[in-house]
Image (tube, rainbow, N blue to C red):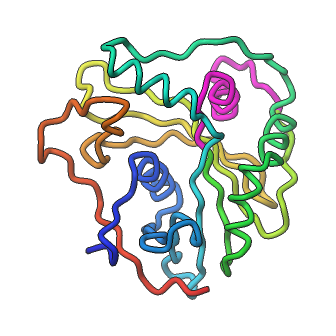
Amino acid sequence: MGNASGKQTSREEEIAFLAMEQVLKVDIELADAGAGDRQPDGAWVYPDSGRRHAVVEITSPPATSLLASWAAAKREGRAQSESGSVDLRLGELAEVCTEILAEDWAKANLDKLLAKSADERHLFLLGRGHDVQHYFYRLSDSYDDGTAEHVDELSLPDGITDVWFRGRARRDPVEPLGAWELWLARFQRGVGWHRYVVTIEEQQLPAPNAGIADDPAPEGWREPKNRTINSISD
C-alpha cells in the first residue's frame, strides 16, 4: 500500500496505531496525509460491521521546553532524563483526567474529532513530562499487588466515545531492538474503564526524532507499516 501524499506516520502515531489495532482488531489508515490539521490522524472501518466508521486523534500536552531540553542533551552528549515531583492526588484520577480534557489544547483536538462524521471518535493521549506521565501510568496499572486505586467514570463531550491513555513501557532488557510491552488505559462511553498490555516490535516503528535521539537501528532495518488513505467519508 502507498500513502496518497507520501506522508508516513510519526513514531508516536505508529505506536498508538499499532496498540489500538491489537486491541480493536482493525486496520487504521493515516487519515490526515495531505490535509494538515483539518483531519483526525487516523481512521478505520470495523470488519463485518456494515461499514461502521471510526476516527482517532493522537496528541499530548504541550511540552516545548521539555523537547528543547532533550534536544540540547543530545547535542551536548548528555543522557536525557526527566525529574520532578507531583501532587499524588490519590483517589482523584478521574478529576485529573477531566481537568486535562478541559484544557485548550485538548478541546482543540476534541473539536477536530467532533467536526468529522463518524460512528466512533477516539482521543489517544500520550504523556510528556513527569507529572502527566505519572498519572497515565497509574491509570493503566493492573494493580497485581491488590492495592487498586478506584477511578471514577469520565464525563465525555457528546460525540466522543473513547479516550485512551498511554501508560508505561518496558523494553526487552536483553534485546533493546526487540519487542517491548506497552500498558494502556481506555475509557469507553457506556462501558467504563479497560486496561491492556500490548506487545510492539521495534522493527515496526519509524526511527526516533533525529533531533532528539540517534537511531540505534542499522539503516534499512526498520519496516513500519505503509498506511494508505481509503474512502473514509465526511
Q: Residue at x 72, y 58 (%)?
A: 108
Task: Give the residue drawn at x 60%, y 26%.
Answer: 129
Task: Name the foreground residue: 209 vs 137.
Answer: 209
Is 20 one of the magenta-colored residues?
no
Task: Residue 79: give x, y in percent of width and height.
Answer: 38, 13
**Relative to 12, is 150 above or below?**
above
Quadrant of residue 40 within the rendered picture: bottom right
Classify residue 143 as left or right of residue 196.
Answer: right
Across and down, in percent, residue 52 comes to: 60, 81
Q: Residue at x 54, y 36 (%)?
A: 183
Query: Residue at 87% across / 36% down in the picture?
Result: 95
Residue 2 percent location from the top left of the image:
27, 74
- 116 to 205, vertically: above or below: below
Q: What quarter of the picture does the N terminus occupy?
A: bottom left
Q: Nearer the viewer, residue 20 or 113?
A: 113
Lateral position of residue 172 relative to residue 35, left or right: left
Q: Quadrant of the C terminus?
A: bottom right
Task: Pinpoint residue 204: horizontal percent, then vertical percent.
Answer: 28, 49
The residue stretch that appears in magenta? 126-150
Q: Please indicate whether residue 115 sits to the left or right of residue 219 in the image.
A: right
Q: Image quadrant of residue 141? A: top right
Task: Report if residue 128 lies within the magenta region.
Answer: yes
Q: How many marks?
A: 0
